[in-house]
Structure formats: C-alpha cells, structure tokens
Image: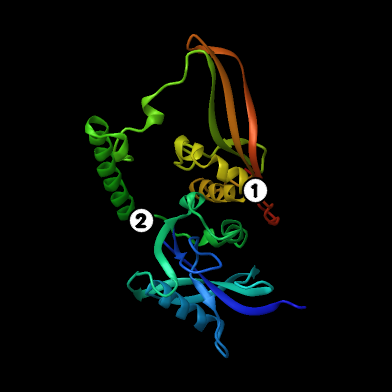
Amino acid sequence: MPPTRARTVGAVVVDRDRLLLVNRARPPSAGSWSIPGGHVEAGEDDRVAVAREVLEETGLRVKVGELVGSVELAGREPGEVYDNSDYACDVVGGELTAGDDAADVGWFDVDALATLPTTPDLAALLSEWGAFGRTARVRRRGVAIRGGATAVVLGLLVAGSLVGQDSAFPFGPFRMYSTRDRPDGPVSSVTIDGVTAAGRQVAISGTGTRLRGAEVEGQVGRFEHHPELLVLLAAAYEHRHPGVSLRRVELLRHDQGLRHGAVHGASTEIVLATWVLPSPPAHPGGGPPT
C-alpha cells in the first residue's frame, strides 16, 4: 500500500547569528526543538503557509524568501510521509511568544544547537543546505551586551563558589572542579578536533568555538550516538575562522598515566566519533585549500 503523503513547510529564520527554534508540544516530535513549520492547507501557497505557521507558533511576522531545501520526513501516523520544503525568512514584526503546538520558542546560537535535543537530522540538513551561511555578523552592540552579561554571570559564579553549595549549580561549586584525580592511575580528557582541506589538524573545542572541555565531556554519549551533531561545531568553527574549510571532525579521548602525581608513560588517543563533511564544488581560479 503506497504511503499517505502530505505537504509541509518549515521556516529557517536567522537573525544576528541566531536561529529561531520551537519546542514541539505534540507528536511526532514532542519535546524536541525544531524550526517553525507545519502542514500546508488545501489550495494554500507554500510561502503563505510558512508565514502563517511562524505567526501561529512564535507570534512573529516574517517575510518569506527563497527555498532553502526539501526533504521527505516520517509523518505522525504509520505509513504517512511529509513532503517538506523549508524557506528562508526574515522577521518584519510581531512579538516572540510560544503558541499553537509550541511548548517553548527562542533564539539560539548555531554552536549551541549541538547541546539541544532536536528533531532527527536537523543540524545535518541545515548545514548541507548552507542555511548557516545566512547568519549575519555580530554587531558591536551585541558584543558589548554579551560581554556585560558574561561579567554578571562571572560575578555570580565567584560569589556562589565562596558561599554557595552544590545544589546552587551553576552558581555554586561543581564537583568536577573541586576534586582531583588520584596521583597513581590513568586520567582522561576529551577534545574535538578538525582536519582542514589541506590536511591540517585544528582544535575545535576550546578557543576554536569557545566550547569548554566540560561541555564536551558532558555530551560525549550524545556525540557518539549522533556524530552528525559534530557538523554544528564545524559550522561554528568555519564561521569564526573565515577561509578555513573543514573536511573531517573527530571526537577524541586522550588517556595519560600518572605515577605519584607526575606523567608516566606514553599517552594514547582514541577516536570516539567521526563525521566527514562533503567537499564543496570546485571554483575555477580559486586559491588553494586551507
């Protein structure tokens, strides 16, 4: 029996390095973050449906632009298939508020998506379609706001470390930083590295994307089961390092032995997850790969 097909649309709404996402309140993706979207009504144009769905789910009015990409998705019922088309959009008005089947709604940095529970293949599809290339440069005012917010959070962390308890985390002590490894035995650390088109290895975690080691270690299991999430970190790295093109991203564990608190023996490196990025089309007259 042929599958039942239905037309659906989605909105790729980007504003100042942030992507608009909704948290689905209903099946088939309840509890997952995804771009706004839904069914196309009978006789309705795709772009009209996109604008309507965004308004219903987020309270924002958008101008619908070009088609970003199309994909078949599993429907809500067995044997149901969604013929989905996603369109680029720009906000022109409205007030952000969760509505319709959205449990929550918000703006998210591209590199923060790796830690969110999203609908299947969302990150890989958006990266494949080049949706992250629509992000605009961060304005100076935005940098100042982020810097001020960082200073406030840092002050809260310092105050919490002096007088807070573990239950106050993240504004209290955290066991990872208040204990130490045994002086005799192995210690491990996890990093995310990339390999450029020229074969050069670069550090993605840490200063490469401002993703801290603790954040990487806390998501090791998720990266192992869903290595396609590594493409988000590749996109974040390339965004912060113009001209650099990555071909492979790896999640690595580094093991090192200790004796009496000092390094003992050779270290070992284990690849926990790998994601290979597609090569971009050749451009005649272009420079060498970086």
Mark found first going from the N terminus, 2 or 1: 2
Name the quadrant of the C terminus.
Answer: top right
Instruction: Find residue 139 and name its label.
Output: 2
Is 92 situated above or below 200?
below
Q: Residue furthest right?
A: 1
Judged left or right of residue 91, residue 234 is right
Residue 153 at x, y percent in the picture: 28, 43
Q: How would you rate the neighbour count of disc 1 (Cα within 10 Å): few for under 14, some for 14-19, many for 20 or more?
A: few
Q: In which quarter of the image is residue 73?
A: bottom right
How dense is the environment of label 2, judged by Cα within 10 Å: few (below 14), some, or many (20 and up)? few
Camera-near label (2 vs 1) is 2
Q: In this view, does 41 lie above or below 135?
A: below
For the residue pair 182 and 210, the one nearer the viewer reads as 182
Q: Quadrant of the N terminus?
A: bottom right
Percent across and percent down for residue 109 are: 44, 54
Give the residue pinned by disc 1: 287
Q: Residue 41: x and y, percent?
A: 55, 86
Residue 236 placement (x, y as % from top left): 51, 49
Q: Can you see residue 16?
A: no
Amino acid residing under circle 1? Gly
